[in-house]
Image (cartoon, helix red, strand yellow):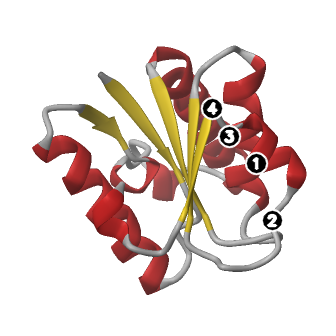
């Protein structure tokens, strides 16, 4: 199965969670696309808006090509990009699995887009 990992990747904690989830799915035989692992060729030579457009297109292609979007969720206002990826996947009829690490208020829009949601903080159950 091809899995796309949607997650904020700004803090060390978020990056560690992504690595853990990616390793979990790969060790179970899945092909995993994590935006954190992908670099845009010649990124430092591009203007910011050019770089951003390339990232956007690459991530859209990866979501279109996947079988499942796994959304790592950190609460109501965790990351607008992650919420967008989750909503886009829902809009094109991709299944979305939501893993909530927040124990916080949640967005009904994000939660309703998920085929199944896991409301726990124990990563071993993913």
Percent position (x, y) of residue 42? 41, 47
Residue in the foreground of this view, choosing between 118 and 82? 118
Q: Residue 90's spot in the image, x, y percent?
A: 72, 26
Q: How far is the residue under mark 1 from the one under mark 2? A: 7 Å
Camera-near label (1 vs 3) is 1
**Quadrant including the N terminus:** top left
Marks 2 and 4, how far apart at CA: 16 Å
Q: Is residue 111 above or below residue 30?
A: below
> Which one is nearer the viewer's eye here, 51 or 101?
101
From mark 1 to mark 4, how far is it between C-alphas?
9 Å
Q: Does residue 10 lie above or below 65 as drawn?
A: below
Drawn side of residue 47 relative to residue 2, left or right = right
The residue that label 1 is drawn on is 111
Of pointers 2 and 4, the one earlier in the residue sequence: 2
Mark sitting on residue 15: none
Secondary structure beneath dot 3 equals: helix
Q: Residue at x 39, y 70 (%)?
A: 17
The residue indicated by pointer 3 is 85
- The answer to whether the residues at label 2 and label 3 have Cβ atoms under 8 Å apart is no
Q: Are marks 1 and 2 in contact (CB under 8 Å)?
A: yes
Specify the farthest residue to the right: 108
Give the residue pinned by disc 2.
106
Q: Secondary structure at mark 2?
A: loop
Across and down, in percent, residue 4 comes to: 45, 36
Which badge, 1 or 2, comes first in the chain's sequence?
2
Mark 1 vs mark 3: which is more N-terminal? Answer: 3
Foreground label between 3 and 4: 4
- In-front residue for pair 61/94: 94
* Secondary structure of residue under mark 4: loop
């Amino acid at each position: 199965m091809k899995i796309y990992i949607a997650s904020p990747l700004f803090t060390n904690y978020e990056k560690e969670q992504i690595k853990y989830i990616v390793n979990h799915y790969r060790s179970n035989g899945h092909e995993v696309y994590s935006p954190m692992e992908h670099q845009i060729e010649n990124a430092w030579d591009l203007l910011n808006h050019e770089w951003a457009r390339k990232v956007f297109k690459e991530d859209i292609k990866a979501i279109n090509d996947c079988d499942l979007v796994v959304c790592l969720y950190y609460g109501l206002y965790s990351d607008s990009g992650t919420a967008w990826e989750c909503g886009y996947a829902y809009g094109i009829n991709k299944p979305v699995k939501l893993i909530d690490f927040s124990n916080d208020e949640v967005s009904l829009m994000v939660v309703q887009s998920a085929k199944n949601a896991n409301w726990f903080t124990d990563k071993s159950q993913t």
